[in-house]
Image (spheres, rainbow, N blue to C red):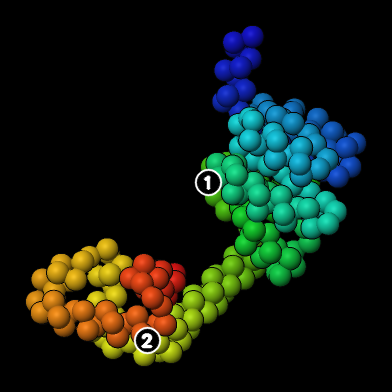
């Protein structure tokens, strides 16, 4: 018995989530013929899948994109949050950029197309287990484009929020130090200015941000730095 346990520990531990039990069982049986793959479970709904990933070690969850009610996207997000060590592969996609991006943004590391062969699926599983992101060049380009778009959006938001607040460069410096939980005395020593001057800056910052406490001001700083 101990030899079997040790062997499974060395294998890639797979969880199959397919809305059609027979289809899931067929894929599971085929995968178990691979010496380096061990199927932990084969389930038909997200609730069963989440129970398994929280109770057992699952290396790769193969999630059918045909689960009803956006179940695959919701499950991908949930697994990413509850079991970050588990990699999610979306099964049965067509290579439409927007659709694939939705799964990547939900936390999927890769995908298998609906016309892929079993060998291609196995290769994808092995690739993601080795830490590789398994996507086509076209989708990789779309992901990079999306990341650039998000970076521009966050930059625009940060600049917009800062501009609206109307903080001066010195007030931004003081706000940064407030965010580091410095007292007025420490801020004065750090900036080599009078404590009274720091108090004036803090008062101005709170007024411009329309907040009533240093903690609220620090929270504002955390927001614009996201």
- Count neighbours of disc 2 (C-alpha within 10 A) and say few if under 14, some if 14 to 19, many if 20 or more: few
Q: Earlier in the sequence, mark 1 or mark 2?
A: 1
Examine the rendering and report whether any part of residue 181 can be seen. Answer: yes
Residue 222 percent location from the top left of the image: 40, 69
Q: Residue at x 44, y 80 (%)?
A: 158
Q: Which residue is mark 1?
A: 131
- Residue 212 coordinates in the image, percent (x, y): 38, 76
* Relative side of 44 to 4, left or right: right
Q: Which residue is mark 2?
A: 208
**Residue furthest front as drawn:** 212
* Distance from Cα at disc 1 to Cα at disc 2: 47 Å
Query: For the view shown, which residue lies furthest in the top direction?
Result: 1
Foreground residue among 116 and 98: 98
Total marks in image: 2
Q: Which mark is residue 65?
A: none
Q: Is residue 161 depicted above or below 131 in this figure?
A: below
Label 2 element class: helix
Residue nearest the observer in this picture, 51 or 191: 191
Quarter in which the C terminus is drawn:
bottom left
Q: In front: mark 1 or mark 2?
A: 2
Image point 68% across, 59% down: which residue? 103
Do callouts 1 and 2 mark residues in contact (Cβ within 8 Å)? Answer: no
Q: Residues within 10 Å of mark 1 (few under 14, many from 20)?
A: few
Report the side of 170 relative to 163 (left or right).
left
Q: Residue 148, relative to residue 63: is it above or below?
A: below
Q: Quadrant of the N terminus?
A: top right
Name which residue lies at 27% across and 64% down. Answer: 180
Q: Residue at x 89, y 42 (%)?
A: 20
Residue 139, by quadrant, is bottom right
């Amino acid at each position: 018995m101990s030899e079997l346990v040790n062997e499974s520990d060395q294998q890639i531990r797979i969880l199959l989530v397919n809305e059609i039990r027979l289809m899931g069982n067929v894929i599971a049986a085929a995968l178990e013929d691979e010496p380096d793959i061990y199927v932990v479970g084969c389930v038909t709904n997200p609730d069963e899948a989440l129970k398994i990933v929280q109770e057992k070690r699952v290396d790769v969850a193969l999630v059918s994109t045909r689960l009803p009610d956006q179940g695959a996207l919701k499950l991908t997000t949930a697994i990413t949050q509850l079991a970050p060590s588990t990699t999610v592969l979306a099964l049965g996609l067509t290579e439409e950029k927007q659709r694939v991006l939705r799964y990547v943004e939900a936390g999927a590391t890769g995908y298998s197309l609906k016309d892929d062969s079993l060998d291609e699926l196995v290769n994808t599983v092995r690739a993601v287990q080795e830490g590789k992101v398994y996507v086509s060049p076209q989708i990789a380009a779309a992901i990079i484009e999306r990341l650039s778009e998000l970076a521009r959006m966050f930059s625009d938001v940060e600049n917009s929020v800062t501009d609206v607040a109307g903080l001066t460069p010195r007030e931004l410096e003081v706000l940064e130090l407030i965010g580091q939980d410095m007292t007025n005395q420490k801020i004065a020593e750090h900036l080599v200015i009078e404590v009274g001057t720091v108090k004036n800056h803090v008062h101005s910052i709170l007024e411009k941000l329309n907040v009533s406490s240093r903690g609220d001001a620090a929270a504002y700083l955390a927001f614009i730095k996201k």
